[in-house]
Amino acid sequence: MEVSWLVLAAIFLAAHAQNNRNDGPRFLSRGHSFRTVVGDTLLLPCQVQNLGSLVLLWRRGPAVLTAASLMVTRDERFRLVDGYNLQITDVGPQDAGDYVCQISDRVARDQVHTVEVLVPPSVRASPESRHAAARRGGAAVLECRAAGNPVPTVTWHKLVVTGNIAGLCVLDTSLGPGSGTIATCKAYTVEVLVPPSVRASPESRHAAARRGGAAVLECRAAGNPVPTVTWHKLNDTNTRLGEGPQLQLSRLERGHSGRYACTVDNGVGAPLVAEFQLQVLYPPEITVERSWVHTGEGFRAELLCTVLADPPAEVTWYQNSFPLSASERVTMSARGNNHTLLIANVQPEDFGNYSCVADNSLGRARQHVEVSGRPGPARFTSAPLARSHTRYVLAFAVDSYPPLDELRLLYRQLAINESFQQPGRWHDVVIPAPSPAGSLTHRVTHELRGLEPGAVYEAIVQAKNRYGWNEVSDIFQFHTLGGTHTAHADELTPMFSSTSRKQIKSILFALYTLLPFFF
C-alpha cells in the first residue's frame, strides 16, 4: 500500500511540473445526478481537455478508485471505459453516493456525480403464515414491513372471499415510467370466528303428528367454523339420536312424545341448544287396575282405570250402559291419567257391570269392571305333598263379605306312565258351609280319604253366597306318599292337565243341572 501512495505522489509531482509549462486542463463533461436500478450498469463520464501530464483520479469519499489508467480499487465491477469514464456493473445499494473525478493540480478541480440506487420494494409479512384468526367483536392485526428505495408506500385492500376477509398490501416505489416496480404481499386470510346461531323449524318449537305418521325437526345452523348439530331426546338418559340439520322420526308411537334438543357447536363460545316438544296424537287407551271388584253391602268399592290419550280424553263412567252422575255415595275423581270411581255404603243396586269410557277427537275406548258381592276365587293354602299314602287334607281360603252358603270340590287322579297321562273321572264333593268367620276371609279344610298311594291328583273349588257362585279356582295338584322313597315338596313337579277352565265350567254346569234330578 505504501508503494501505491509513492507512485501516486510521483505521478502527481510530474503532472504538477508539466502543468506549469502548458495551458490548464478543463472538463468537457459536467457533473450529474444519476438514478439507477439495482443490477443495472452505470457509466459516469469524465472527459478532460489539456490534461497533459496531469493525473486524473476517481474518488468516492476518501477512497481512491483509479489514478490515471491505474485501477486502485479491487472491486472488479469498476473499470475505465473510453479514456477516463468510470463504469460500474451490477450496481448495488452500497454503490449509492458521490463520485469525484479530480484533476491532480494545484487548483484541485473536481467534477462530482451523485448516484442514487433505486431498490425495488421488498416486504416482510406478519404473521408469516398469512393467516389470522379472531373472534367476532375482537381485533386482528396484519403487518407488511416494507423496504426499498425510495421508501415504499403500503396500501391495503379488502377482498371478500367466501365469507372471509382477504388482506392485500400493495407496495409502490414510484420509480418512474419504464422503471417502476410494484411488489405485492401475498393475500392474507383473516378468518373471523363466529359463534353458532340456529334457525329452528317449526319456529314454534312444537310439532304434532298422529301415531304411525312421521315428524321432522330441523336446526339450520350458521357460524364459522361450520357448526356441528347433534340431536338428543331429553329423558333420563339423554339418548343421542344422531347428527345433521334434520331429525326425521317415522312410525311414531306414543313413546316418541316428549322433549327433543339439537345442540349446535363450533368451538367458538358456548354451544347453543334449541329444544322442541313433539306431540304424538293417538286415540284413548285404557287399562283397569282390576276387572272384578269384590265388595259387600255397607262397604265401599273403588274402581280405577288409567287413560292414555293425546289430545287428552274426556272420561265418563257408566253402570249397565247408563252414564253415572256424582251423588252423595258416588264420587268420581281424576289424578293425572288415573280416573277413580268410588262407591260408598254399597247397596244391592250398586252391583253390576261398570264401564270406563274415554273419548277424544281421534277415537273412543272402553273397559269393563264388574262390581260383585259373590265370593272371591278360592286360594289353596295346603302343601302339595300329603303326609299319608291314602289321605290328604285340602286347605283353602275364600273371601266373602256375606257368609258362605255352599262349597263344592271336584278332584280326580292323574294316571301317569312314561308315555302319556290319562286323567281319571271327577269326584264331586259338597263341603258343608263353614260357620261365619267374622271376617272377610273364610278358611276351610277338608280331608280326602281312600286315595291311591304315590299318585298325583288335581282339584278345583267353587264357593257360593247369597249373590251367587264365584269363579272356579285355579287347578291345584297334590301328591300322596308311595313306595320307599319319600319326596320333598321342592322335588315335586306340577303335571300337565288337559282340562281347561272352560271345560271345568262345562262340567260344573252339568253337575249343577243334573244333580237335582238324583236327589
Image: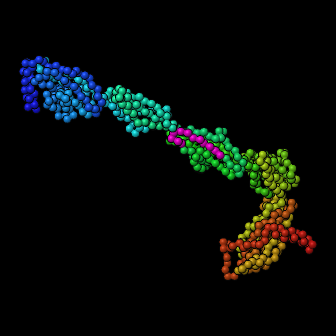
Majority SS type along the magenta span: strand
Q: Is residue 183 magenta?
A: no
The spot of residue 32 in percent (x, y) is 25, 22
**Residue 190 screen position, x and y as percent:** 45, 36
What number of labels is visible?
A: 0
Q: From which residue to which does the magenta span run?
A: 216-227
Query: Which of 291/10 is in front?
Result: 10
Using residue 511 as the reference point, say whether residue 146 is left or right of it: left
Does the stretch in magenta take in 220? yes
Q: In the shown orientation, is residue 177 left or right of residue 305?
A: left
Image location of residue 321, percent across then percent down: 86, 52
In the rendered view, does 108 fall on the left or right side of 272?
Answer: left
In this view of the protein, can residue 152 be seen by the observer?
no
Q: Is residue 331 left or right of residue 83?
A: right
Query: Is 422 located above or below residue 182 in the figure?
Result: below
- Quadrant (top left/top right/bottom left/bottom right) for the C terminus: bottom right
Q: Is residue 207 above or below residue 166?
A: below
**Image quarter for residue 167?**
top left
Q: Nearer the viewer, residue 493 or 106?
A: 106
**Residue furthest to the bottom:** 484
Q: Position of residue 13 (x, y in %)?
A: 7, 23
What residue is at 38 percent from the left and 35 percent from the top? 125
| Identity of the residue drawn at 19% across and 34% down | 75
> Which residue is more in the foreground, 63 or 263?
63
